[in-house]
Each structure stands twice: as C-alpha cells, then as structure tokens.
Amino acid sequence: MKQKEIKNVVAGLLFYNGKLFAASRSEKDERYGKFEFPGGKIELNESPALALKREIKEELAMDISVKDLFMHVSHEYPLFKLEMDVFICTVDKPSFKLLVHKDGNFFCKDEILKLPFLGADLKVLAAIKKRLDF
C-alpha cells in the first residue's frame, strides 16, 4: 500500500474585535464551499510564523501578528495526511481581499459554530469551543 503524502501547513485563528475569521474554498477546489481557517504550506527554510504571515498576505492581502501556538492537528484525508500548526493571531485592520477563497468574513462565536468546516478544521473548532471565549 502506497504511503500518503504528508503536507505540513499552518493556519491562523485571526481575531479582530471579538470575532474570528474563516473563509470558504473557491469553485476551483474539490472541497468547494467548505470553510477553513486561512493559512497554507510552509516553504523550505521558512518558519511556521513567517509562512503564516506570507500565506495570509497572499490569500487575503491582510497583515497579521502571530502570537501563540494554539494546537497541532493531524488529519487524514483520502489522498494525503495533513500536519497543521494552528496559531492565535491578531489583525490590526479588518480589511481583506478574497484572492483565493469564495467567501470569508469575521464571525462571532455563534455564527462560526454553524459553518460547514473541513475535517482538520473541525478539530480546531472543537478545541475553540472548549478553550476560547470570544
């Protein structure tokens, strides 16, 4: 049996004014319409914090401050295994551009708990429900 590719990625819990940002995948993606906490792949010789700042800038044209590691998630999708470090981040200005996502916004806790999230992000959402009050 062929071993699954491992993807090492980072994601950010982007907080602004008591709300948390989430974005949905674009029509070009097989996971179209599912929400995620934004982030992406770590490039060679790049720290997780720098990768997260770069990815958020590339995907949302937003500047963030990376604070603390919130959790690590391991999740198996049908074609690959995801290893994801999730960081708590703050946003100075809530303006953003959806450069790769279909939809996205800052949501209050009640709103975000109702969104359809991807598998790995569901694990993050469960931890948020237990550990964070926003």
Image (tube, helix red, strand yellow):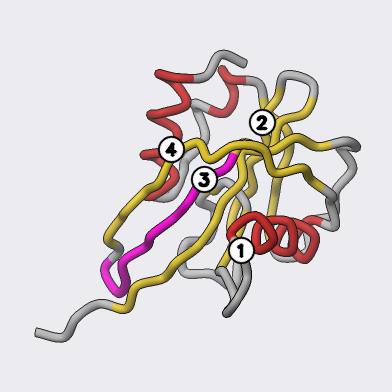
- Residue at the top extreme, as displayed: 133
In-front residue for pair 133/34? 133
Q: Secondary structure at mark 2?
A: strand
In front: label 2 or label 1: 1
- Of callouts 4 and 2, the N-terminal one: 2
What residue range appears in magenta? 78-87
The residue depicted at 64 percent of the width and 48 percent of the height is 23
Question: Residue 124, labelled with which disc?
Answer: 4
Q: Real-space Cα distance between discs 3 and 2?
A: 13 Å
Q: Pointers 4 and 3 in contact (CB under 8 A)?
A: yes
| Kind of residue sitting beneath label 3 | Val
Pair 4/3: label in front: 3
Write down the residue under mark 3. Answer: 86
Q: Which residue is mark 1?
A: 47
Q: Is residue 64 above or below residue 28?
A: above
Magenta region's main secondary structure? strand
User: Which amino acid is tagged 1?
Assistant: Ser
Residue 85 position within the rendered picture, expressed as x and y whole percent measured from the top left: 48, 51
Q: Is residue 39 above or below residue 109?
A: below
Q: Residue 20's mark?
A: 2
Q: Is 86 a magenta residue?
A: yes
Magenta run includes residue 59: no
In the image: residue 11, left or right of residue 66: left
Which label sits in the foreground, 1 or 3? 1
Q: Of label 3 and label 2, which has the lower sequence position? A: 2
Q: Earlier in the sequence, mark 2 or mark 1?
A: 2
Q: Residue at x 69, y 44 (%)?
A: 66
